[in-house]
Amino acid sequence: MQLLVQLELVALLVRPGIVSLPCLLRHHAPPVMLATPPMFSVTSSPNSMVELCANGKVNRFQSNLTRIRTCKLSSRDVRLLRSSTPVLAVREGFILFDFGDLKGVLQHDRLTLIGADRAAVNALGSQVQQQLALSRGDLEEYPFEVRALECVLEQSYSLLEQSQRRLSSLVTSTLAEMTDTSSRQTDARRGLALARLLPMQISLKALETKATRLTEIIKELLENEDDIADMCLSLLHRRSHGSEVFSSTRASTSSNSGGAVSPLPIASGASNGHSTNMMPTFEADIDTTGLAMLGDGSIAAAATRALDKDAGAERVAIEEEEAEAERELIETLLDVYLARLEALKDQIESITAEIETTQIVLELTLDNERNRIARLELLLSMIGLGVGFSAAVSGFFGMNLLSGVEMVPGLFGFVIGISVFISSGLMATWWCRFRSVSRDQRSRLNDVQALKHVLAKMDVVALLLRNRPPLPAHSNAMQAELRALLMDSGLPAMSTRELALLCNILKHEQPSASELSRHLYSSLPITFPPRPEINASPAGL
């Protein structure tokens, strides 16, 4: 209501000749602060950073991600650093990396770590600083970006390896508790060990994902030759700095000579009439016939161009050798850590496979327990059916009806005996049937195990039988000969079941007598009798 009254008063006063609205607001209305909605900006929150220089200096400062002193990041790079995905990206003049706790920017002469106010980053930064200080003696041999990248990769790998070792020890102890068959290991403790195994599996999966992502990043870098070349930051800096110095030197020389190239000593010799004595120095690049027709300035310019051409070619060759050496150095570094990460992945996969194998064994154990309970239930059911038959007979004779046999002497004992006999016979029949089914199952399992052992030794037996006569056709004789052959060769003895399976396999492989004779006759050479000579003399005719 008060607001409506004020609005009506403003409408009455704002008329021509009375007062203007700005004046009224200035004298009567309180200042109004308009609330603006907050907007996202990449430069809104400064981050604590630590800078490790190549000369050993350590600088701590606060800065935004978009501009880190001598390096300017794009919005895309800022989003990469703020994401939780591992990053190792090559940009123009710097390398962007994010390995979890370690993230920052690597340049040719400095390493900037982001988030230095955190304890983990501070500890890792101190370790990187110590490693860089220890490797400072190799400054002439290895560039700064190679040593810094090695330190960062080593710290990231060491964190992954420590996590893998810690999880491996925890998983090993937990699996030992789960598979302990001693009396002191209760089901409650096994249940607690099984409950602890789930978060360990989740941690192993996260660790494997991180190692896989790092492996993929390094593989992508190794497959791209341009990225490997762009990672040679010191070489690129020297090239750009050298080209700037060379261009500035040439510009100052041209300005001092009035636009012409400064003459060399050959020019002074030519002005004194001794140009022919200086000419053999440049006979490989300058044509003497052409130089004789040129003036002194042209000769000096041609000589300078020849020298620049030779120096440029030599400089290009040296730069190519340096570039190739630095590329090989970076490729070797990435190959080493790629191999270590793949080995770490293999170890994590082996731990995961061990967990899965243990779970399968526990499932089989539980299945065995369920089978035992089912057998017990089946046994009780068979006993119940047998006792139920006797109960049915007793129920028939226990009815309050007159049948005429109530007073027969000795009939009570006879009925009881018949009932017990029939019940026992039924239970014995069902039990024998159940045992026969169990024996068949065990026999099939034993056949499978025997076949596996026979197939594992089949190649060795085939080599032993290669230069021997054919085995006898009778099974007992064949088994006896094979047993003697195995004993003579020093191989482990086989069971009767395994020897029987081996004899069956060899019988299928051994050709029959007709096939053997057919093969023998087909392999014999065909000979023809000699042709009689014909005497062609007239006397013989």
Image (tube, rainbow, N blue to C red):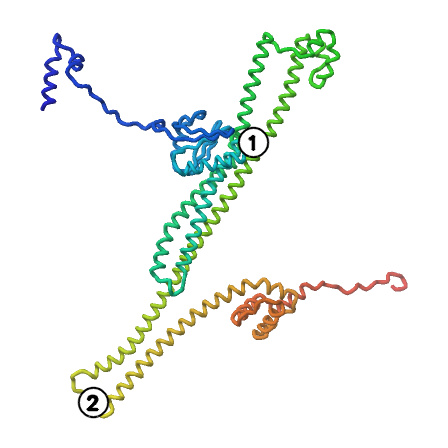
Residue reaching furthest bottom? 409
In front: label 2 or label 1: 1
Q: Are marks 2 and 1 in contact (CB under 8 Å)?
A: no
The answer to whether residue 86 of the structure is visible from this angle is: no
Left or right of 464, for residue 531: right
Residue 261 horizontal/vertical position (percent): 62, 11
Q: Nearer the viewer, residue 264 or 377?
A: 264
Residue 427 horizontal/vertical position (percent): 33, 78
Q: What is the quadrant of residue 433 in the picture?
A: bottom left
Residue 485 horizontal/vertical position (percent): 61, 70
Query: 10 Å neighbourhood of mark 1: few (<14), some, or many (≥20)?
Result: few
Q: What is the quadrant of residue 281 in the picture?
A: top right
Residue reaching furthest right? 539
Q: Quadrant of the C terminus?
A: bottom right
Nearer the N terminus, badge 2 or badge 1? 1
Q: In the image, what residue type sits under mark 1? A: Leu
Give me the residue at 26% from left, 86% from top: 415
Q: In the image, what residue type sits under mark 2? A: Val
Q: Is residue 173 above or below residue 264?
A: below
The answer to whether residue 419 of the structure is visible from this angle is: yes
Residue picked out by circle 1 = 139
Residue picked out by circle 2 = 405
Q: Is residue 504 above or below residue 162?
A: below
Q: Secondary structure at mark 2?
A: loop
Give me the residue at 40% from left, 57% from top: 359
Q: Secondary structure at mark 1?
A: loop
Give me the residue at 63% from left, 11% from top: 262
Q: Quadrant of the N terminus?
A: top left
Query: 10 Å neighbourhood of mark 2: few (<14), some, or many (≥20)?
Result: few
